[in-house]
Amino acid sequence: MMKLYYAETMMPRKVCAVAKLLDSPIDYAYVDLGKGEHRTPAFRAMNPAGKVPVLKDGDLTLFEADAIAMHLAVKAGSDLWPSDPARQVEVQRWLSFAAHELNPQTGTLYFEHVIKSHFGMGPVDADAEAAAIKATKRHLSVLDGRLATSRWLAGDGLTIADIAAGVTLPWAQKANIPLADFTHVRRWHDDLSRLKGWLDPWPERAAAAA
Ligand SMILES: N[C@@H](CCC(=O)N[C@@H](CS)C(=O)NCC(=O)O)C(=O)O
């Protein structure tokens, strides 16, 4: 049985969504970030960056959410990570776009509105929010153009690129992510929302220890 160390936050959400969609056989270990459980020597031995998610699968210890999502898809023989090399390049293109362009901006909005209030980290930084909204709109217009002619980001089939790029959208209202002008992004997110586990990917909580 694989073991996934997670919290109910942005990056683990990708992996929990993929796991739920694929019915992956996983033993879940909730990591309480508020208590610093991700900073212990035992946790850092699994991920020296001290971040969730981390997956253990036999002798393999894997961190980085996109890589874990890929691993789960490969193990399940799922087209969420396609086997065709040309399709893989296309999936990687949108994974990169999500990681380097879109998600740092939507992630800032998520941090300002969701994380700060959850962990009592003070008020929203209005300048950071304004800059992130401006940049998010720029990146959402790229997605909107793509999704005007393609059901999913990498073509006709759902892939982990959709899951990675869409990960903050279930928090869109709370995080003030500006979706109003992007019809095709909203259609795409409605499609994602119909997937098993998209809106509630979280497992029953169990302690991280052991
Ligand atoms: N690049 C990593 C980032 C993981 C990450 O930022 N995880 C956050 C939760 S969403 C975390 O563990 N934060 C704790 C901290 O930075 O102290 C990935 O994609 O898995």
Image: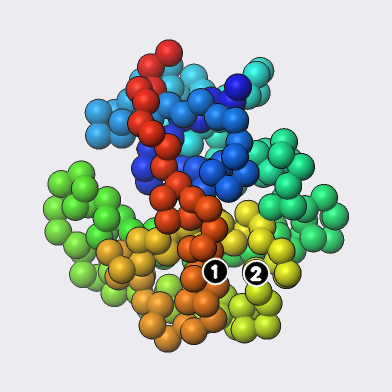
Identify the secondary structure beneath mark 2. loop
Q: Earlier in the sequence, mark 2 or mark 1?
A: 2
- Relative to 172, residue 73 above or below: above
- Residue at (69%, 43%) from the top-left corner? 73
Which quarter of the rendered picture does the N terminus lie within? top right
Q: Is residue 39 visible?
A: no
- Residue at (31%, 55%) from the top-left corner? 111
The image shows residue 51 at horizontal and vertical percentages of: 43, 35
- Residue at (61%, 36%) from the top-left corner? 24
- Relative to 21, residue 176 above or below: below
The quarter of the displayed image where residue 42 is located: top left
Q: Nearer the viewer, residue 56 or 207?
A: 207
Left or right, residue 147 beside residue 183? right
Q: Nearer the viewer, residue 147 or 105?
A: 147
Q: Amino acid at mark 2?
A: Trp
- Relative to 20, residue 3 above or below: above
Label 1 belongs to which residue?
A: 191
Q: Nearer the viewer, residue 41 or 202?
A: 202
Q: Residues within 10 Å of mark 2 (few under 14, many from 20)?
A: some
Q: Tell me, yes or no, whether the two marked residues, 2 and 1, touch with CB atoms within 8 Å.
A: yes
